[in-house]
Image: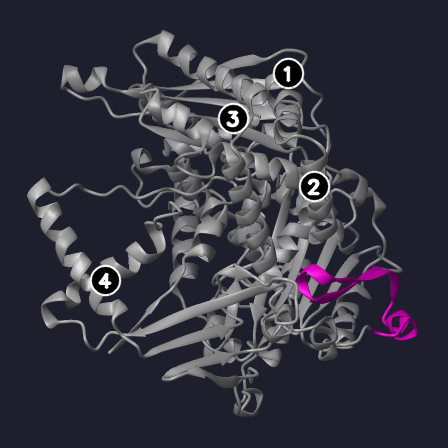
Amino acid sequence: MVTAVNASIRRSALRSLGGKGKKQGARSSPPAKQEGEKMMLSRFLRSCAGQAARKDVLRGAAGTCRAVPGDNKKAYSATLNDVTSDIPQAVDPSVAKKYGFEQVKEEFVKEYGSNCILYRHAVTGAELMSVHSKDENKTFGAVFRTPVENSTGIPHILEHSVLCGSRKYPIKEPFVELMKSSLNTFLNAFTYPDRTCYPVASCNTRDFYNLVDVYLDAVFYPRCIETEASGQQVFEQEGWHYEMDSPDPAGLSFKGVVFNEMKGVYSSPDSVLGRVCQQALFPEITYGVDSGGDPRNIPDLTYKEFVDFHQDFYHPSNTRFWFYGNDDPETRLQILSNYLKDFEANQAAVQKSKVLTQEKFPEPRTVTDYYAVSESEDPQQQQQQKAYVNVNWVLEDDVFDVETQLAFGFLDFILLGTSGSPLRKALIDSGLGEAVCGGGLEDELRQPTFSIGLKGVDAGDEANLKKVEQLVLDTLASLADKGFSDSSIEAALNTIEFSLRENNTGSFPRGLSLMLRSMAAWIYDKDPFDPLKWEDQLAAFKVKLKEQTPTKLFGGLIRKYLVDNPHRVTVNLLPNTTLQKELDSEEQGRLDVLRKSMTESDISELMQKTQDLKTHQETPDPPSALKCIPTLALSDIPKESQKIPTAIRSLGQNVEVLSHDIFTNDVVYAEFAFDMSSVPKHLLYLIPLFCRCMTEMGTKSEDF
C-alpha cells in the first residue's frame, strides 16, 4: 500500500493571495482522548519513518519549491529555447493584412512562456490579442465595454439573451445543444459593472473553433434583437415580463430569469453589503448603479432600450478579442475576418462606452443602509439581530501601475492573508463581531478599492458600530508606524511570487485567467501586455525593500492609500424586519396600477402571451433545426494523448526519481510517496491525519 504526502503550497498560495481565504475550525477532543491520540500518532510516525523503501517524484505539474541558481537547475526547469521551440510562430504582417489586421505590437512574455501579438482591425478598429503558447487548452474571449446609467440590468439581461439563438444557429438554446457533444473545458459568460465577457475553452481544435463560431454569431447576430415577435419573446423570457395564468387579476406578477435571479441576490446580506459599498464609493459613475439589475428597476427596461444597447455596444469597434493556446495563428485571423468584414467603424460606440473615473472625496463619509430579515416572535432573538460594518477606500484615480499593484498586493496579504495577519487578528480578537467581512484589495475595476470590516456586530448599540471603524483606523495607523515582522514580509513575498509563477488556476483555463488579468488594463485603453509582466517589477520591488526599511515602504503605502486618504466610506448595514414587506408592497403597488387599468380584452391578451411564452419554453426544437449545431467526427479526436517528457533514475537502494523536464517558470514541483505496507492495521485510519500533520503542523524549527 502506497500513499502520497503532498505539500499544500499551491492551495495555500491561491487561498491566501488577496486575503480571500477562510480557515476551517476544528472541534477539540477531551484531554484524555487527546493524549491517547498523541501516543498513537507517535507510533504511527515511527512506523512510517522506519520504511527504507521510498519513491521521490519530481514533476512539472504540481509543486512545492523554487528552482535555485546553479548547475542542478537545468535538471528541473526547461530552458527558454525549450519553451519557445514548439510555440506557433507569429503570422507575417503581410498575411495579417490580407485578413484586414495591422500588427500593433509583438512581445514574448517570459513569465508565461508565451509570444503575444496585439492586432487592430483596419476597418472597424477591433483589437485582438493573439497569445501563442504550448498550452493545448485553447481559450477565446470577446469582451465588450458595457457601462450603464441605471439599474435596469441591461448588460446582464443581454448576456443571457444573446445565448438564446442567432442567425446561423436559430434554435432556442444552441449552447445547451452544443455542450451535449462538445469537449469544452469552459463555456460561460460574465457581466461586470463595466464590461461583459464571453469566454470559451477547449483542448480539441475542431471543437474550439466550433465554440468560437457559435459565440461570435451569438454576440453579433442574436435573435433577441430581431424586431419580430421572437426577439421580444427572448427579451421577456430572460429579462422580465408580466405573467397571468387566470382571469383573476390577483394572479398578475412579474417574472423573468434575470428578474428572479436578482431577487435572490438582493435577499443575501453579503451581496447587499457589496453593492452598497461599491455604490457609496462611486456615486457619480457607472459603478454607482447595478449592472446586474435591481428588481425594483428591471421592470422599467423597455425592449427598444434593450435593442439600442446592443446596437451601441455590441459592435466590433467596441470589442477586444482574445485568443490563447497552441492552435494555428492564421486561422484565428481568418475566423475573425469572416465576421468583421460585414461591419464599418463605429467611433460613437467607442466614445459612449468609455468608463469614466470617480472624482476623489474631500472628506470621509458614513452611509447607513439595511438588509431584510424575518421578524421573530422571540424577543431575545430580536435583540440579537446583527449588523455589518465595513470601511472602504478608493485607492487611486486610475488603474494601478504594475509595481504599485504588486506592492499593495503584498501589503494586502500581510494585513489580511492569514489568521495571524495583524489587521484580521485585531478585528477578530476585538470581540466586536463574529467574522471579518470585506475582501481587502479589489483591483478589477478601473479604480482599485480596499474594504475591511466585521459582520455579526451588535446592531442595538450604535457605539459598537463606531468602535469597529475606529479599530480599523487605529490598527492601520499603528502598523504604519511600527511595521511588520520580517517573517510576515518574507512569507508574503514567497507566497505571492509562488502564486504568480505557478499561475495555477485549478479547473479554470490558464488562458482565461490571463485574459481577465490583461482586460483589467486593456478595457480602459491601457497596455494589455503590462498586467502579464511582473518579473522585472517584482525584482525592482525587492530592491526597494533592501534600499528602504520595510516599515518605511509599507508604512508609506498605508498612510498614502488608507490612513490619510479622504476617499473613505464607512458602511453600516443594519437588519430591518419590515424591509421585505415594504419591497413586496412596492412591487404589488406597481402591479395594482396595471390591474386597475386593464380591460377584459387586456386580460385575455396577457393570458394568451403568458401561454404562448410557456409553450415556446416547453416545446423542443425540431430535429431538423438541431442539425445546425456543429458536431465532432471521430477523425477530430486525437488518437494519442499529449506526451510529457519523462526520465527515470535511481538515487540508491529502492529509491527512484521520476522527473519531467518541462517549462515550470522556475518552480520545482516535488511529491514524495512512502510505502505504508508496514503500518499496523489498527493504525491505518490515522494515515489521513498523519498526511495533514506533515504539511500543516510545522516542525521543531518552523511553525505552520
Q: Position of residue 638 (x, y in %)?
A: 55, 88
Say if mark 3 contacts mark 1, CB within 8 Å.
Answer: no
Q: Who comes first in sequence, dot 2 or dot 1?
A: 2
Question: In this orientation, which residue lies closer to the viewer: 104 or 314?
Answer: 104
Task: Please tell me which of labels 2 and 4 falls first in the chain.
Answer: 4
Can residue 242 be seen here? The reply is no
Question: Which disc, if any, is residue 45?
Answer: 4
- CA gap, disc 2 and disc 1: 23 Å
Alpha-carbon span between mark 4 and mark 3: 50 Å
Q: Which residue is mark 2?
A: 541
For mark 2, does the 10 Å Cα neighbourhood hold few (<14), some (14 to 19), or many (20 or more) residues? Answer: some
Mark on residue 277?
3
Question: Mark 4 against mark 1, which lies toward the viewer?
Answer: 4
Q: Position of residue 565 (x, y in %)?
A: 64, 18
The residue depicted at 13 percent of the width and 58 percent of the height is: 40
Q: In which quarter of the view is residue 339 placed?
A: bottom right
